[in-house]
Image: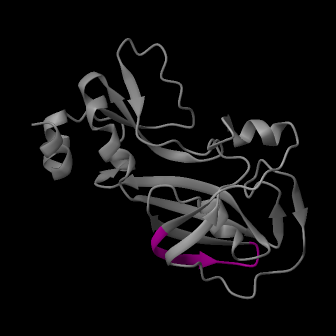
Amino acid sequence: MTARPSRRHDLRGLGARAGHAGTLDPFATGLLLVLLDGATRVQRFLVELPKTYLATARLGWRSSSGDPEGELTETGTLPQALDLPTGTVRQHVPMTSAVRVGGERLYRKAHRGETVATPPRDVEVYRAELLGHDAESARYEIECSSGTYVRTLVETLGDAYCSELRRTAIGPFRVENAGEEVSVERIGELIPAAAEAMR
């Protein structure tokens, strides 16, 4: 298994059976776990690991997609508070996500200008620490469950969108160690449930 920072998830040309343990939004950077050959057996355990992000909220603006790739509108109004919700949070899947509705990925519908009722999901936000802020932005470190849309979390502030997003950790794997190869045996040591499944 290889962990490497990437903005793209194209695994073609690696010359091995390959997969990954969780995508990144197109505008995001950071850690992506790439699984090669035998490591693909533990994918389901890695996908469900909690994630840690550094996120920047641009204040006084809104985005049609919740990120810098949407249509941006300056509101001139700052959020009344900068606290993000924690605990169990119900989110609606964004139209720009890769979730399938009616057999088609939502982002394909969005590209055609279609809107549909998106499914809600409950996610866990374990920690949302405000690291600092000024008149234009607020910076957070967020630890959350798999399936959490950080840009949707940032939108709960009101007049704000997620302008920068970097994934710094997936469970015990950290971006500082990206590029290192980790054996299946080592994964089993770090994630006991995976070790049980591989016996």
Q: Residue at x 48, y 53 (%)?
A: 167
- Please give left or right for residue 158 compared with residue 176 in the image: right
Tell me: residue 12, above or below residue 24.
above
- Please give left or right for residue 184 compared with residue 156 in the image: left
Tell me: residue 185, above or below residue 79.
above
Q: Residue at x 15, y 51 (%)?
A: 192
Q: Is 102 or 123 nearer to us in this picture?
A: 102
- When asked about the image quadrant of residue 154, the answer is bottom right
Q: Residue at x 75, y 56 (%)?
A: 117
Q: Quadrant of the C terminus?
A: top left
Q: In the image, which residues are magenta?
A: 124-136
Residue occupying the far bottom of the picture:
80
- Please give left or right for residue 65 compared with residue 131 in the image: right
Assess whether residue 133 is covered by the magenta stretch.
yes
Where is residue 139 shown, x and y percent of the image? 60, 70
Q: Is 74 or 25 nearer to us in this picture?
A: 25
Where is residue 198 shown, x and y percent of the image? 15, 36
Assess whether residue 169 is covered by the magenta stretch.
no
Q: Residue at x 74, y 58 (%)?
A: 66
Magenta part, dominant SS = strand
Where is residue 73 shown, x and y percent of the image? 90, 62
Where is residue 145 shown, x and y percent of the image? 44, 62
Number of numbered markers: 0
| Colour setting | one colour
Q: Quadrant of the N terminus?
A: top left
Residue occupying the far front of the picture:
102
Q: Is 112 or 139 nearer to us in this picture?
A: 112
Q: Is 50 or 119 nearer to us in this picture?
A: 119
- When asked about the image quadrant of residue 85, the answer is bottom right
